[in-house]
Amino acid sequence: MSIKNNLNIITNTIPENVKLIVVSKTQPVTSILEAYEAGQRAFGENKIQEMAEKFDILPKDIEWDMIGHLQSNKVKYMAHFVNLIHGVDSFKTLQEINKQALKNNRIINCLLEVKIASEETKFGLSFEEVVLLLTSEELKNLKNINIQGLMGMASFTENNEIIRNEFKSLKTFFDSLQKMKSFNVNPTILSMGMSGDYKIAIEEGSTMIRVGSAIFGSRNYN
Ligand SMILES: *Cc1c(COP(=O)(O)O)cnc(C)c1O
């Protein structure tokens, strides 16, 4: 199957209110262009430098999302162009994003990453930490960020019930945040679902899926 075919299968089967982010990490520019020529404009990368290099050479109407874990000292390399940062999991990182957004005279859209998987390796905030962050006085000083919702990754397991329950818990929590809306908190995006579990994620209320290998084939490394 070609990249174009794989992409069409997914875009033709997901609901209209679900946005597909094509995860192009480790993929060469030629493969990204194949998806671009099939009409795809939203791509996700997990390394800031790799994303910045691709931004420089690829068409400028591509939206670049950062989906990986962030190192604060590298935020400056993407602040001028990044569309949405999915993996924010500390106030310190938000402060750095705000600082770099201000320098670029922009407002940068962010999602807070929540840890829903049972695995030790996954990053993210607890539900309690998200509430503390969203209700903190200090958040009001960050005028150049816009928190648009949450991102989560389910456990890496064959057990669909575990995956479903993790997504369900994130959706319930996401719904509870609607009452916390403010000038820089506007929870409309729930980013959950990857190649192996996006169908379950959509059934459980995802509004944004991040899909790589189901489109490009399996990667040799992450
Ligand atoms: C790599 C990655 C994806 C895509 O994974 P696939 O299984 O290839 O679809 C989605 N989200 C994050 C955060 C990733 O790092």
Image: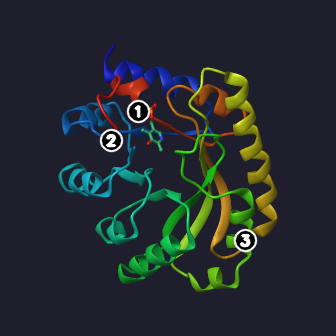
Asked whether mark 1 and ligand 1 are closer than 8 Å, the reply comes as: yes
Residue tagged by mark 3? 132
Q: Secondary structure at mark 1?
A: loop
In the image, which is nearer the foreground, mark 1 or mark 3?
Answer: 3
What's the residue type where badge 1 is placed? Gly
Residue tagged by mark 2? 25
Asked whether mark 2 and ligand 1 are closer than 8 Å, the reply comes as: yes
Q: Position of residue 206 (x, y in %)?
A: 65, 40
Q: Is residue 10 rendered to the left or right of residue 113?
A: left
Q: Is residue 1 rendered to the left or right of residue 31?
A: right
Quadrant (top left/top right/bottom left/bottom right) for the C terminus: top left
Q: Is residue 148 above or below residue 205?
A: below
Q: Please give the name of the residue rendered at 51% of the width and 75% of the height, measured from the top-left corner.
A: 92
What's the residue type where badge 2 is placed? Lys
- Corner quadrant of residue 23: top left
Nearest to the observer: residue 217 or residue 62: 217
Quadrant (top left/top right/bottom left/bottom right) for the N terminus: top left
Nearest to the observer: residue 157 or residue 139: 157
Give whichever of discs 2 and 3 has the lower sequence position.
2
Asked whether mark 3 and ligand 1 are closer than 8 Å, the reply comes as: no
Residue tagged by mark 1? 212
**Cα distance, mark 1 to mark 3?**
33 Å
